[in-house]
């Protein structure tokens, strides 16, 4: 039987900025990894990402986000073999169609980045289970608050060039040292 969550024992710490409102208007760069960084989303051949079946679902479901969160506009996005990168633009207008579940370990704020990513990951995982596909996300996700137009453009370029630089990527398990 699993042990109850104990903060001192499990040492879960947030990687989010303290006292920052992650549902406020702005641009956010997010990275979500596959569990154990397994390369199951596809392969990069000659600098081009070729999506697997689950990679296509990950890709398609990303573009469903604005249907569930009217406060979100999508910007650049790419699927890599074992992770995804995307830019979400939040504008707090409209009503959310899907209210995420809350549990005693975390408090998900409606229309926040956490709410959006949790809903996205849950949708992909649900499809995976319904289709007997053995796929799991890594716990949590990485985010960066984009502070200005110059930074936004640099991150867009990074996302667009990511497949071309896969051989050098630290997330690539076959990376040449």
Image (tube, rainbow, N blue to C red):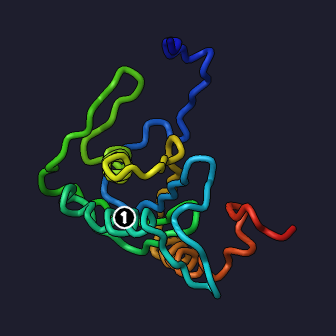
- Residue 71 location in percent, x, y? 22, 59
In the image: residue 173, left or right of residue 67: right
Query: Count of labels shown?
Result: 1
Work out whether residue 134 or residue 155 is closer to the camera in this orientation and state it: 134
In the image: residue 172, left or right of residue 21: right
Work out whether residue 87 or residue 36 is closer to the camera in this orientation and state it: 36
- Residue sitting farthest toward the front: 132
Residue displayed at 67% across by 74% down: 166
- Residue 176 location in percent, x, y? 83, 70
Residue displayed at 62% across by 83% down: 45
Work out whether residue 20 or residue 77 is closer to the camera in this orientation and state it: 77
Residue displayed at 63% across by 47% down: 36
Q: How many residues crowd around disc 1 within 10 Å: few (fewer than 14), some, or many (20 or more)?
A: some
Residue 121 visible: no
The quadrant of the image that shows the C terminus is bottom right
Q: Is residue 98 above or below residue 62?
A: above
Q: Is residue 75 above or below residue 138?
A: below
Residue displayed at 43% across by 62% down: 54
Element under label 1?
helix
- Residue 90 location in percent, x, y? 30, 60
In the image: residue 18, left or right of residue 88: right
Tell me where residue 19 sits by quadrant: top left
Please name the residue that numbered disc 1 is placed on.
57
Residue 8 visible: yes
């Amino acid at each position: 039987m699993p042990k109850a969550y104990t903060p001192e024992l499990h040492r879960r710490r947030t990687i989010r900025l303290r006292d920052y409102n992650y549902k406020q208007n702005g641009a956010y760069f997010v990275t979500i990894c596959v569990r154990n960084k397994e390369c199951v989303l596809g392969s990069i051949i000659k600098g081009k990402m070729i999506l697997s079946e689950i990679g296509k679902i990950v890709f398609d479901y990303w573009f469903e986000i604005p249907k569930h969160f009217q406060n979100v506009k999508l910007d650049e996005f790419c699927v890599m073999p074992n992770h995804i990168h995307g830019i979400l633009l939040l504008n707090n207008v409209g009503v959310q169609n899907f209210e995420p579940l809350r549990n005693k370990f975390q408090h998900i704020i409606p229309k926040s980045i956490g709410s959006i990513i949790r809903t996205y990951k849950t949708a992909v995982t649900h499809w995976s289970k319904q289709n007997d596909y053995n796929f799991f996300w890594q716990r949590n996700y990485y985010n960066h608050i984009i502070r200005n137009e110059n930074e936004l453009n640099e991150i867009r370029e990074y996302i667009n060039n990511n497949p071309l630089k896969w051989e050098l990527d630290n997330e690539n398990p076959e990376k040449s040292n």
